[in-house]
Image (cartoon, rainbow, N blue to C red):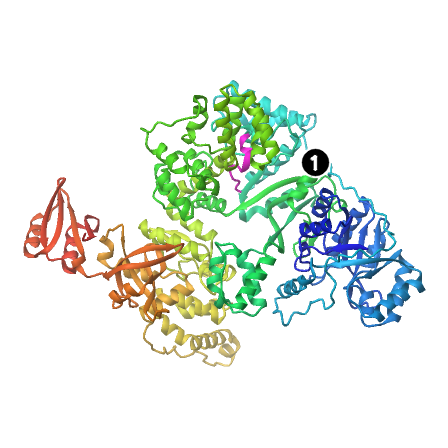
Amino acid sequence: MLRRVHTDYSLLEGVASIEEYINKAKLLNVKELAITDFSMFSALKFYNLCKRNNIKPIIGLEIYIKGVIDEDNYYTLTLLAKNSQGVKDIYQLSTISYERSEYGNNYILLTDLLEHSSNIYILTGGIKSELVSYILKNDYNRSKMLLEKLKEEMDIILEIPTFSMHEFQKIIFDRLVEELKLKKIVVNEIYYLEKEDKILQKIFAAIKENRTLKTVQNDIKQDGFHFLENNLDDENILDIDIDIDDANVDFPTIEIPDGLTEREYIESIIENNIKTKYTNITEEIRDRIKYELNVIDKMGYIKYFLIVQDFIKYAKENDIFVGPGRGSAAGSIISYLLGITEVDPIKYGLIFERFLNPERISMPDIDVDIEQERRMDLIEYIKHRYGSRNVSQIITFSTFKPTLALKDLARVFEIPEKNIRKLLDESKNMNLDDLKDERDMVKTLISFAKRIEGKLKNSSTHAAGVIITKNDMRENLPLIYEPYTKDYQIQFEANILEALGYLKMDVLGLKNLNVVKNVVKRIGEDIDIYNLPECKEAFDLLNNGNNTGIFQCESDGITKLAMKLKIHSLEDIALLLALYRPGPLESGLIPSLIEAKNNKNIKIRYMDSSLEEILAPTYGVLVYQEQIMQIAQKIAGYSLAKADELRKAIGKKNVELLKKNREDFIKNANISKNKAEEIYDLIDKFGNYGFNKAHAISYANITYQTAYLKAKYPKEFFASLLTTELKVESKLLRSYSEMLKMNMEMYPPSINKSTVGFLPVENGIRIPLSALKEMSEKTATDIVAEREKNGDFKDIFDFIQRCRFLNKSNLEGLIYSGVFDEFNLKRKELIANLPEIIKWVDKKIKAETDIYSTLFLNVNLEIEEYKWIKTDEYSIEEIIKLEKEFVKLSLKTAQILKNENIFNIFKSKSYTIGYIESETSRVTKKNELMNTASIFTLDGNKDYLIFPKEYMKFSRLIKKGNIICFKKTHLEKDRYNIIDCFAIDEFSRYNISVMIDEDFEFKEEFKQYILENRGDQDINIYFENKKTVRHINLNREFIEKMISLLGKNKVRLQIKT
């Protein structure tokens, strides 16, 4: 009996993973196993795992073919490769099925199959085959007719299924074999592991079809599609011998100037570039170049470097912004001098052997970051350069994570998402095993979520990977064809292709590089973005927690770490990026590193004095992988290549290898055995936490670029950032909050001033039309194009007449967003008048275009002036709500706070002033009232909980439209609760301080006003570095007087302690 499996790589067809099938096969002592998914996604992974577990792998494909008798439908055949050539033939048939795809259904024609059939066994197929469809209907005649036609065309094998059938249907199979003298094989077609897993197959079908369990259409009704334990004996008619070796792929052909070898050509590029990179070309630099080039040449990788150099050169010459580097490639001076990276490895002490190990042949891995918007342009160049059939992107897969599994299952089981919202929130940070719920249906949900967690759900394109081959890759690889883009995608994952030896380039699009490029374009200055000067203001942004838009530094965790670490250099940024990972964060060593860094009086203790030079840059803590290599070189005399092998072994945690390495390290150490053991234990403990320093320095450059541009050109930076992140609400709100703190303005959208992207203006940026709800980028572009062509819009009538392409929803969205406020029209009034305005404009257009009636019939087609329907305006609360919906933030709220003098002079670390935009009370299980208030502050808009005890004290204050001063505590993540609160004008809670300059011209008036307003509250007067306390009657009038005399920046209101 042949067992052929459908794995979870069939994407919601098969249920079990390859590993689960192989473990089951081993348990049952099964000697061979076939894979027959509807694609080749997992073929080589299956092959390798079978080989590793001493199971004979059979590579197959279940493929749809146009019906032989029923030509209106498509049915499956089972294809099994006889040998390695047969595997390639199946690859090509799989590719053809994608090329012929119609409406998402892949298929081949009989002629396609016959062209590639000589090294393939063709079986009649299983549950989805034409033959089985007739047999399940007890249709013997059509079954026989089908087989007779197939037998005429090919050497067909009758696949006898093991799933449950009526006795009569089994008799049909026996009769067909006997009458037509067919070869036959019993096949256990497997979709799931155990009998009880059938429900999972049905659940997968429901998820795939976006249906509920009750209504799923694609459910296989028969039983028996699990892994059968009994081994039904039948004659083995399959002679299969598959041996898949590494691809042994040649690099693509490159153009080299006549008369030059590859070595001479790369040397000429290096010599042309070296003087622009180094003003002083030292012997160390020359030696490094010679050493690296010899290693690269010996390993046969000069062509690889030239290929990368070529497309990066093209990018830079064609306005495609390229990042400074990524990964270990920045450790190579050749990469630097070819312009592949922009990081000087000599300056930062980076190690070449971490990138390319001369003692172990492996493909170099040069990863390239470019601006996201132009990634496909660069890939198109690579296709043009090496041939469209020789260049392809790679597939990747997403799996069921806990939250996704619960959401999909809730829909399948018809459980409203609101009923499990708490569970969904918990699943983001907890294992499914730790989730608890007493409701039976939810228990069932969690149980099934555990069973599908980690299974594959869908495929997509790898974010970076591009494969380049010398020949047409259809000859050796299975491909997916996308008819809309006419692009191919390789069906194998990146790690499989790398293991086969294919040339893989990682070309990753980064939005942050779009931001950097756009800022530089906006400011119009000649900036060498790869060699920026040191800028204290840029470091201060990180040190003060103003990290919005700064590359890799936006999370709360890294923001706090940066503020503690105190950043003063690019190396500090690299250290920050290296430390902010689970390993270092959990090691407990970061506090001591921070203390040593910021307190020069602390003497760092090293296990051995020889470690000081290596560990001093990271304040005594092992942070970088390169430090492991340096320690092994210095203490045990390892070559850097051998030290890199040690680093890799530690990362893999291979017990036997670690034991051997430990013995070797201690034996070769040039210090005492005890110290050598201590140092090795240090390496072993923290080695797997180590970060690639070359990568840290490379990405620290992007971090610094974004910080520098933000510090020097904040308007252009925020405009570029938000244009890149258009309609990303969280980014807009966070940016707005930070802009308010920086005293920058967010100007409202305007029909005559807004453009398609965010625009730097005056002291801030203006919201574009494209950011508004009901506005696509194309619609916004069309409006701006009309305005630029024919001038500003004069009024609402002129606008509607000139922008006839807008629908009613577009117009309402623009009104609600306030873009017509400059016409001095009320938003509510505009909405009320809109239908009539549209009719009036239609009449006006008709009148203006009916030239015949006007000229020849002397008909006066002038229309009456429009009569407005008068209404009042929306309330403040309504405008705030509309702005939040259509603009995604409320500019009105900020305006209210900014107009409040108390808000402008208030300073406190623990209290905050905010505007209550909405609030909702609810009754707790203990029958007590609590509240959730949505409050706008300088930190943006957040929801705050007010628990019953506190709500009893100040419920009178928690009203929509109130401005309050409150103290909060952090509960978890983005959850806060209010523990104290008072009205903004409750002046008994404040003290006031004023700063008086020596040349203050209103001294007498100030003194007199203080005397006239005596009371029982303190005013702290700072003059000539002295503090004087007077007692005054503090009220709004007093505050406004102080501001008028001294200015806002000289008056401070603080909480009374």
The amino acid on which the numbered mark 1 sits, given as a three-letter code, is: Phe
Reading the image, the residue beneath label 1 is 251
560 horizontally vs 329: left or right: left
Specify whether residue 769 is painted magenta. Answer: no
Residue at x 40% of width, y 49% of height: 718
Q: Nearer the viewer, residue 673 or 89?
A: 673
Residue 542 position within the rendered picture, expressed as x and y whole percent measured from the top left: 37, 42
Find residue 143 and report its horizontal and vertical position in percent: 86, 67
Is residue 404 toward the left or the right of residue 794 in the image?
right
Q: Is residue 330 magenta?
A: yes
Q: Which residues are magenta?
A: 320-331
Total residue callouts: 1
Q: Nearer the viewer, residue 977 or 378?
A: 977
Question: In percent of the image, x 53 and y 68: which residue is there?
Answer: 440
- Where is 647 relative to 887, above or below? above
Could you say where residue 832 lies in the image, as x and y percent from the top left?
39, 76
Q: Residue at x 89, y 67 (%)?
A: 144
Q: Is residue 341 above or below residue 1052?
A: above
Q: Secondary structure under badge 1?
A: loop
Quadrant of the rendered image containing residue 768: bottom left
